[in-house]
Amino acid sequence: MYRYYAEIYGARISAMRYGNEMEFPLDGVIAELSENPRLLFLANPNNPTGTLFGFNELRKILCAATHTAVVMDEAYAEFSDFSAVSWIRKFPNLFVARTFSKVAGLASLRLGAVIACKESLAFVRRAMPPFPVNLAALVAAEAAVKDRATMQAYVNEVKHLRVWLAAELRKLGVPSFPSAGNFLLANFGPKGPALFRKLEKQGILLRERTKDMGPGFVRISIGTSAEMNRLVKTIRKEWKALA
């Protein structure tokens, strides 16, 4: 959506690509900041790679962004144990975006928040509609905040199943990449598209990344334990059939 809205406003876009091992392109980002862009959008953890960069990289970026507003998208922050919120007082050009879509499961209500210093938020308010949050979203958000135990239980389950799924894929010779989100990026290679069609016919839908990452790349969302067991069993069966 960042690209979509940037193009609507006629912005010049410079997109950075992650490395072959999905490593964060820190040097490329620093080089772009030397051109003093108006805005820098960063997703941490990133989607669909799941990549997470740490405080050392963040410090280098913020120190280099002397004339740039840095927007940190932390949609998956709860699954990573990392947040840039504590840096806001030191860097007034930092904006942190959070959402109820992932950890609270309220994606259809389109509810989120931006966290920044008071002076910076004054600029954001100028562009806000008069009624930015509808009543249904507000009621659901209040209920979610009051039930943090349920959300934490979900986060714990995701972290456990994320590691388990990566191990099961390794047994099949399928590489995946370390993820700090509620999903896993895997590369099934040339046989991937055929496998995905077989899974689709059985009601298992995966997020293919063939167009932007190459044949066989897929993002797998972490579901319940029962759902993930069914997924692995089905993949194991169909993968052998394609051998």
Image (cartoon, helix red, strand yellow):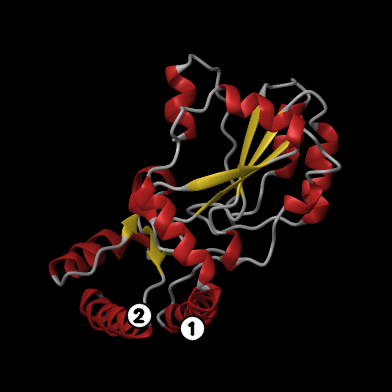
| Residue hosting label 1 | 164
Query: Which one is earlier in the sequence, the residue at label 1 or at label 2?
Result: 1
Residue positioned 46% across, 58% down in the render: 141
Please, which residue is most extreme toward the top here? Answer: 10
User: Is residue 52 placed above or below 88 in the rendered structure?
Assistant: below
Q: Amino acid at mark 1?
A: Trp
Quarter holding the C terminus is bottom left
Query: Mark 1 falls on what kind of element?
Result: helix
Please, which residue is most extreme toward the left here? Answer: 201
Foreground residue among 217 and 42 = 42
Foreground residue among 180 and 233 = 180
Where residue 222 appears, x then y in whole percent? Answer: 41, 71
Foreground residue among 2 and 93 = 93
Foreground residue among 202 and 169 = 202
Where residue 125 appears, x then y in whole percent? Answer: 59, 28
Residue positioned 60% across, 36% down in the render: 16
The answer to whether mark 1 and mark 2 are in CB contact below 8 A is yes
Q: Amino acid at mark 2?
A: Met
User: Is residue 70 placed above or below 43 in the rendered structure?
Assistant: above
| Residue hosting label 2 | 228
Mark yes or no: residue 211 visible: yes
| Res. 17 mark | none
Quarter holding the N terminus is top left
